[in-house]
Image (spheres, rainbow, N blue to C red):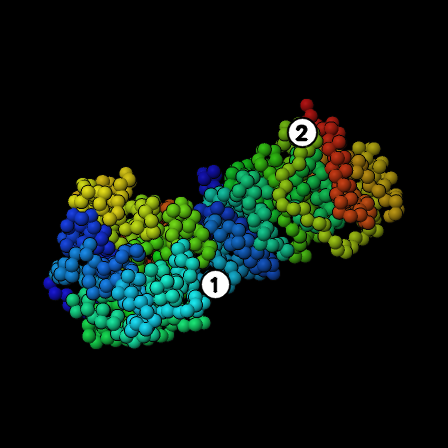
Amino acid sequence: MERKLAEETLLTDDCVRQLINVGEVDILIGLPTHNNSRTIQTVIRAIQTGILKCFPRERAAIFNVDGGSQDGTPELVTSSSIDDVWRASKVFALRTLHAISTTYGRAPEPCTALRTILAAADLLQAKTCVVISPDSTAIEPDWVQRLVRPVYDDKFDLVCPIYRRHKFEGALMQNLLYPMTRSIYGSRVREPYASEFALSGRLAADFLANDVWNQEWGKMGIELALTITALAGKYRVCQSYLGIKAQSGRAANDLVAVMRRTAGALFGSLDGNYAFWSGISGSEPVPTLGTQPEALVKLVRVNRKRLREMFATGVAHLEPVLRSIVSPETLTALQRIATLGINEFDYPAEVWSKTVYEFAAAYHKSVINRDHIIQALVPLYRGRSLTFVLENRDDSGEKVEKREESLCGEFERLKPYLLGIWPDRK
Amino acid sequence: MVLKRETSWYKDATIYQVHVRSFSDANGDGIGDFPGLAQKLSYVQALGVNAIWLMPFFPSPLRDDGYDISDYRAVHPSYGTLDDFKRFLSIAHERGIRVIIEMVLNHTSDQHPWFQESRSSQNNPKRDWYVWSDTDSKYRGTRIIFLDTEMSNWAWDPISKSYYWHRFFSHQPDLNYDNPAVREEMWNVMKFWLELGIDGFRLDAVPYLIEREGTSCENLPETHAIIRDLRKRVDEQFPGVMLLAEANQWPADLRPYFGEGDEFHMAFHFPLMPRMFMGLRLEDRKPITEILQQTPQIPGSCQWCLFLRNHDELTLEMVTDVERDYMYDIYARDKGMRLNLGIRRRLAPLLDNDRRRIELMNGMLMSLPGTPILYYGDEIGMGDNIYLGDRNGVRTPMQWSGGWNGGFSTADPESLYSPPILNPVYGYQAVNVSSQERTPHSLLSWMKHIIEVRRSSTVFGSGSIEFLYPANHRILAYVRQFGKETVLVVNNLSSAAQAVELDLRRYKGNILIEMFGRNVFPRIGDAPYLLTMGPYQFFWFRLRRI
């Protein structure tokens, strides 16, 4: 590993100098940023309070990897170190808590950011490495404990979060990422693609040495790649309830880009892991720590008419493309759904599951340009989202969950179908 | 040799703390005595210290190791006679060693004739020499110091049918300093010893002299007035005599005890000591720099007294709850090691007998601003015995040799005042002066060397301190400066080797001369000065512009 680090020089000389000053740590908190000056101090304060409150004796450091901020984000991070001259009225710090920063480029690259964090964790021999999103303005100090304890005390290798969300939030997670990851990899990880997570030093080092960084799917969705690597590598994975997932409002609106990072990465992961996932049927629950919070109740406006239009238009305009991706039966079903009015609109779980699997197989076979495949999935996902909204409009969290469970069941039931259309099955 | 009456000798001193009872037994009765101590002064002199601080040696029922005095003008018969003391004092002075004795101002033993008279009747002339009350409800805001043994600061006296005030053990009634007769008599006691030629007093438990309703009964203005009066008398009649305050307080609360240079000459820096231990285990300089930043400036004639260990428990009164829990967990996992709010262990066992850590801690003790005090036996790495009660586990016989009773006494082992340390790691057969004197690299030899190096420069006793804050928090670095002399001290608190870059630009052009080996290090330039340091290593560099 040391040889590899030296060869690839993931860490700049200045970064290494800062890491020398930090020295060996028990907990490394990674903060990947890009122009987060509005929120970064709130997040850092919560992290510091969490560490001082729950891990006052542990050697900890905050490590910011910045993608070329122009708003002074790194300076805000480094100025928050708890050192010799630090004064705070209410919080007591037993030891120094460094907050250091390094810049890896001029634009945010989640893959490079995480790789840099893991390289630092490896160099500092961190027992636990935590990654926290600088956008998580609803972060509470307790998050640190909820992420760190399972690794530190219970020897889990990966801690994925479960957030408290509104029932209509995280639709992509609920309709695609979670059900498919669960059926493919056999573990019920609710947020396989998370912006907050914790991992053991062992997993951090192994993942750093993994070849996934050089593979297309890894580059697209490195956080998902981490979860999948942990599941496929039989690492100890658990989930921890955090809290409200609130973001600063900068969440990406470009659904195609999001779909590339998520569905693209998930489909891509199937290529190299066939031997592992093809032997799995059904799914196992993952140890989940903490108390399940109530779903948020708030007014979320969804433009149902527009969703329907985008679906119908997509099915019509992309028919030649869809024909090369999905089966004739699925295409017929999609065309039928596209004719439905808003009140009777229904994109059933079975059709959606088959659609996704057929897209995954097409992606594997590269029947057309892979990026076009992902783009073609976007209008269909909008249709499924509309059904999701319509189905759950008047229901409580419990009923929404039941329906979600049913969708997952459908994905699991149809997994043999995926294996049937997968060209590598022999 | 007649010691010069220098008025600030204490600033450059290195003090050796000794209990007469524990050091050497000349008459073979199992208890150390002044003739024995006098015989060992050549050892003390060779160690390189230039002052000796004696724990109480006065007649006493010894229920608090002599801090319960029953006669202030005599020597406890177990330790010899007053003439023995005079002979010891004379020899010490001949060897260039000043003598500081203990003076317990705040309280006496309940066996002291003054108290016996005071309790005998409400009309006795000495009734007002102590603090009496019909109720135990006065001064309710006052904390109890010995939490493990005392329920109240008041004790019922069945003879005089009233309560008496005591801040320490109930057999140690507090004197009433509101009574002018008491103040005068205690000055007469001090004068008695000053006229014999002693060089200083360590005044015990000074914050507690006066009581006032509605206060904590600590650090009161009236207490300071008494100290100023004593100091004035000392300066006028016995110039050059030093007064050292024992006041376990925060630095800001201690500062008034220096007054405007008209109260104590020196005071113990209690909060620093546990933080040195804490910084070492945390491998982080923060606890040390933080407390020293909070330490106020003191008048130029005054000095802090620094120590690593002494005859008491490693006190944790001046730390936060979080820090105390940490210290207990790290240094006293066995509950038997804990006493009151502290840890009753010696230096070597506290540091797991790790020679590198012992050296580093002594290096900091000798180079931080203040006068260092060494506790007898710590210079050879003596161990402790936590199975002895109270603080007796750190007061065991000095280990002179691997022979009979460790060379402490010719008495039968059973008759020693305390069993010597016998275990294979710290026992006198493994740890003793004789064997370490024969080994050039022993801890004792090393201690002699560091004391000698410290004495080679006045910068450590009198110089200013400026902390450098290298980004590597495991490195504690500071510059001591006095007159034209500048010394750079760099300590690695970590158990691992460390690289550190020091910003020394303001000393550009100087070369560094390592003070122990006198080796030359590269000249300081514009670039950060890079040092690589081994685990627990420390450097003292003299800066020279050549």
Q: Which of A304 and B424 is in front in this view?
A: B424
Q: Which of B279 and B215 is in front in this view?
A: B215
Q: Which element carries disc 2, helix, strand or loop?
A: loop
Assess disc 1: are there few (<14), some (14-19) or many (≥20) residues with their C-alpha within 10 Å of its C-alpha.
few
Residue A221 appears anywhere in the view = no
Mark 1 residue type: Arg
Q: Is residue B71 rendered to the left or right of residue A118?
A: left
- Indicate the quadrant containing the C terminus of chain B: top left, top right, bottom left or bottom right: bottom left
Mark 2 residue type: Ile
Looking at the rendered structure, whether the residues under marks 1 and 2 are on a common chain is answered as yes
Read off the chain for label 1.
A
Q: Kindly identify the residue that appears in the image at 35 percent across and 64 percent down.
A: B159
Q: Kindly identify the residue that appears in the image at 16 percent across and 67 percent down.
A: B196
Q: Kindly identify the residue that appears in the image at 58 percent across and 54 percent down.
A: A141
Read off the chain for label 2.
A
Residue A84 appears anywhere in the view = yes
Indicate the position of residue A155 as horizontal and vertical percent values.
54, 39
Q: Mark 2 points at which residue?
A: A280
Q: Which element carries disc 1, helix, strand or loop?
A: loop
Q: Which residue lies furthest to the left in this view?
A: B1
Q: Kindly identify the residue that appears in the image at 63 percent across and 39 percent down.
A: A287
Q: Distance between the residues labelled 1 and 2?
A: 55 Å
